[in-house]
Image (cartoon, rainbow, N blue to C red):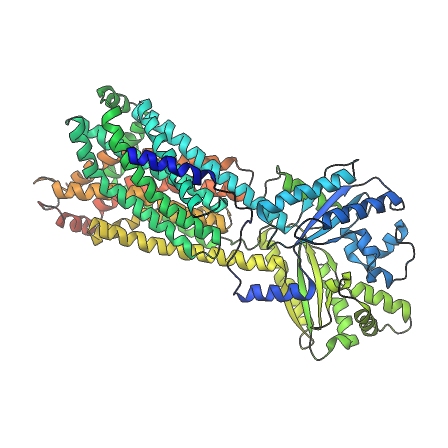
Amino acid sequence: MTGLIIASLMLIMPASQVRIDPSGVTFNTSDTDDYKDYLAFVESFGTDDYILLAVKNDLNVTDSKLKKRIHSVNKELTSINSVIKVIDLSTLESSDMVKFMGMSHFWDPRTFVKLYKIIPSLSRLISKDMKTIAFIVKIDNETLNGFQLETQLEKMKQIIGNTFPEYPHCYAAGIPVLRAAFERHNLISALVFGSLGLLFGTLLAFYIFKTLWAAFLVMLTSLGSLLWTLGIMGIFDIALNLATGLSFGFILVVSTTTVFHIISKNIQLLKNNSKDIALIKTFEIILRPCFLCALTTSAGFLTLTISPVKMVQQAGIIISIGVILAFLLTLIITSFSLPGFYIFNGSIVFKTKKDFIEKIVKNYATIGFKKPGLSVLTGLLIFIFLAMGIPKIKTVKHLTNPFIKTTQEAEDLAFIEQHISSATSFSIVLTSLKNSFDTRTFWYDLYKFEKKIKSINGIQTIESLTPLVFRLALKLSPIGIKPEIIFRQVLSKSHENDMTRSYLDPDQKRIRIIVHIQNKTSEQIEGILKQVENEAKKTFVNKAGVEITGQLILLRSQTSDLVSSQIKTLFLALFVITLLMVIQLKSFVLGLLSLIPNLFPIVTIFGIMGWFQIPLDPLTIFAAVISFGLSVDDSIHYLTQLKREIFISKYGSNIQDCLTSAFDITSRALVSTTAVLFFSSLGLLFSSFTHVFSLGVLIASASIIALIADLVFMPALILKFKPLNALLSLKRKNPVALPNKK
């Protein structure tokens, strides 16, 4: 114990040096075709990673103060690291797009009214009532993201707020802002989940065992496990992020449940044994199933390392190591603490017989023994009903509208959409085939195409060179409009850093159309993308190559890859854990039997998602991995005790006696440990982030269903299904014929 204390003290230093990961979600997708296509797009047109900042303004556009303020903001924003370019009214004024129109008085309301129709990007820089000014800040999202982005974003807001003191609040929107908020909300929720696990574990220990000593032991082992986990993270320089943050909750749950099982068994054995003998027997009985729980949970989460996201890989490693550490620390601490601090009091047993948990165990959980047929039928119907919801699941491919409307991000987004424009966009890139850009028919087809897709529900605005080309063609050649000639002139006069280069790539003979869409659901956005792509391919067949691209499309690909990898992880964890169960229980029958109750939480999660329209995304699929990894622990303890009861059963007893005995010994501990996970996950329901709220609903539901499957459905199935009953009877030390039913 002294060595453990010294080692723990030594870990305080590296644990204190664990840093928060500022980089956000990063995908290992550099070798994928989608990522290479996106890099080619950026090479041609520049990055489309941008933040849209807006502020209210009372100055008239003719007021020179407004121009000076915009210049000042542009200069300060451009000086911020990782800011590539700032686009505002002043940059638009100096661009070739305005010069082509030959307008001498730019800062004039009448000029803006004319330019709104010719240069669609103007509407994203100043509102139609000219009371809101906006800045488009293009950033390098590879280096500026996550918490770093939010830090710099606050600096940007402060710059704009100081420059426009009449309305100091600056509104922000854009995919980078959305991603950073996503990561922050998730990290906070992960830490809340871990904290609630510690809190409820301590409170439940006091309630269950009716002594402060048990609560202190839970807190001591949990904090010790937390310290060692942080120490390991500090030694290997693994940062705290939204994925590794979740590991604390799981490690604390594992530590707490191990303590519960050890104390429960020790109390049972103290009735007829001395403290030392009871302690020895406790570890003889409980060591194997507790170790298997830690091993299966560790192995299950280790499968997360196949994820394409680095932070998820790190979470898999941290949880795997942390769970084993929590198990070992709990064994060491309890082995020294149980004899020294605990004095058996017979009143504890009397008190537990009257508490709420005991009532649940005796009055409700025993229905599987009282009415096995009804229990099996009900269980199968529930399973089928939940399974019927699985085909209704909708996969989220776009990170959009994930906030409940009480968050600042949602309020900012709503303001910008109302006064300026949507901050969500994608690009259509057309590549010339056989010099089609030099033909008049192509430009007329392009004009008709843009007009048609504008009518699609959900599309807000379209940015391209088309309005400018046709307006100049009409101005210079009113009799016969020749847009192809105007395009060649624009192409020859545009220089590398001009705004026109956001819409054309003269070297690769590519032009770009930017489509801004309203803040729709993922399914609606996907529908818009398909409509646009189909219309583009139909319009430009044999005239131009069509590619739908941009940050929105790249994130769709990465999100789909992540969900796919998590599903693979789930099935891999299912296989690995079942294999470990077979090995540990030394029984193929019992190993496969463990699958039955553990399929219930998985089907529950996917069924609820289908029936209640909770979308499948990287966080909700994570709930299935979590629930399976933790719920399997109950099956291990029950089946290990069942195997022991079968082996030691006396002549004349039957399988029902063994099941009943295993139930009496383990049920209270199983209900208690499930309560820790259930109440901890309920804390996630208070999150303002809908994805986190859904995670809490799914884990809480799965934990309850898993408990019912273990204590009610599985015993009832064994009793009712004669072939399974017979197989288990053969494993008994003194097998007897199955009792005939009267």
Report the residue at 32% width, 44% height from top: 324
- Name the foreground residue: 651 vs 669: 669
Residue 57 in the image: x percent, y percent? 81, 41
Could one spot residue 609 in this view of the protein? yes
Image quarter in which the N terminus is found: top left
Farthest residue to the bottom: give it.
434
Q: Quadrant of residue 425?
A: bottom right
Q: Is residue 472 above or below residue 319?
A: below
Q: Is residue 403 above or below residue 526?
A: above
Could one spot residue 366 in this view of the protein? no
Residue 604 in the image: x percent, y percent? 40, 46
Q: In this rendering, would 64 be left or right of 531?
A: right
Q: Tag count in the figure?
A: 0
Residue 554 in the image: x percent, y percent? 58, 59
Q: In this rendering, would 314 be left or right of 344?
A: right
Image quarter in which the C terminus is found: top left
Residue 154 in the image: x percent, y percent? 66, 41
- Name the foreground residue: 385 vs 206: 206
- Name the foreground residue: 23 vs 366: 23
- Name the foreground residue: 545 vs 705: 545
Q: Quadrant of residue 357?
A: top left
Q: In this rendering, would 544 be left or right of 250?
A: right
